[in-house]
Amino acid sequence: MELSRKNLGIAASLTLEIDAKAKRMKSQGMDIIGFGAGEPDFATPSYIIEAAKEALDKGYTRYTPSSGIIELRQSICHKLLRDNKVSYEPNEILVSNGAKHSLYNIFQAILNPGDEVIIPLPYWVSYPEMVKMADGIPVFVDTLEEENFGMNLDNLKEAITSRTKAIIINSPNNPSGCVYSREQLEGIAQLALEHNFFIVSDEIYEELLYEGAQHLSVASLDPQVRDITLLVNGMSKAYAMTGWRIGYTAGNSKIIDVMANIQSHATSNPNSIAQYASLAALNGPKDIIKDMVSQFDSRRRFMVDRINSIDGISCTTPQGAFYVMMNINDILNRMHNGRVLGGSLDFADALLESKNVAVVPGIAFGADGYVRLSYATSKENIEEGLNRIESFVKELI
Ligand SMILES: Cc1ncc(COP(=O)(O)O)c(C=O)c1O
């Protein structure tokens, strides 16, 4: 029998696939260095785990309101006002099963067939597929490594058409680590207001900033911008809570209501225990995040310096998140063990097979001249992995 034509065209998540492959090889006893991780390598802080245990003991094991418990939605409002300087009411918040689910709900709620969504390159792997799942059309906008992959407003203007329904901005960015400046955000917001499209602002890496980089929520620019913005955030990256699956959207209540209706039929409430744990996380101490950021920072600097010390590959210095985009353009089309490295997939495959090092091919992010390395792994692993990458590059002919 024929399956859904629309969904047969949806690609698997390459990043999750590569991470799974590396984990599988490791479990078979192979000495794998994994640079594929999309999650902090730290444990969830103990005060959050305690809150989850307490929720279990108190019997918070039943359905909650589909949009999330009111206490959590209130705490999210409090956090958004405190950290992001934007004011929301609890009926403007929807708690979902991870920020990924929040984004999925958004595109289901705002898109009609043929609507275009602008996605800057390089992009997080799931954006184009989510847009397609909602019958939308992804439209890509180029950015330049020389401009730290920041938004180029001229390129953005060229991409806008009468069918533009939204733009996705992701700052700090996965995979480039770019953090948008106030000027860039103001430029995007002005174009969105002029041309009447939504801003989907994925702020999941907001806490992971280096060298004084500042995170600015585009919704905080002014009330009109707030009204066309859907702000997405979650617990995964800031609190090392990837497995707990809690994310949220803040936005105009008319859109939130549509998203809440979709969610109420698709999944009902996010896990009740994880919601109580998230409540504790948002109201708890922030020094744990600071410790994590300082470790990421030292690994980041080490990784950047080491990559730039290897002939043939290079990278710019990311300002946020925990990834480095390693430029492999100069070594593409060279040979390793008789195999031509025609693109980032060949590079990643040959590296994994010959040196047991897992990286994510840039093609997953629409940037085939790059591979992404995550520094959410120990310094020892980074050192050993980059030694192996150096020896791989030296073997190229
Ligand atoms: C840019 C970006 N947005 C959203 C997510 C989803 O996060 P989660 O669903 O774990 O909250 C991720 C996870 O890797 C991400 O990198």
Image: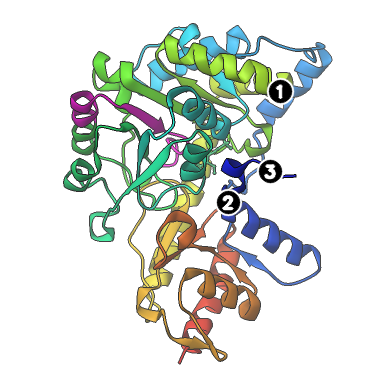
Cα–Cα gap, marks 1 and 3: 30 Å
Cα–Cα gap, marks 1 and 2: 27 Å
Relative height, residue 41 to residue 274 (above, below): below
Observer-nearest of 208 and 174: 174
Reading the image, the residue beneath label 3 is 3
Dot 1 falls on a residue whose secondary structure is loop
Residue at 63%, 38% in the rendered image? 242
Residue 218 image position (x, y, % from top left): 30, 27
Disc 2 marks a residue whose amino acid type is Ala
Residue at 71%, 21% in the rendered image? 51
Residue at 55%, 35% in the rendered image? 100
Residue 184 position by quadrant: top left
Stretch of the chain drawn in magenta: 189-209
Q: Nearer the viewer, mark 1 or mark 3?
A: 3
- Among the two numbered marks 1 and 3 on one chain, the one whose residue lies closer to the N terminus: 3
Observer-nearest of 367 and 139: 139
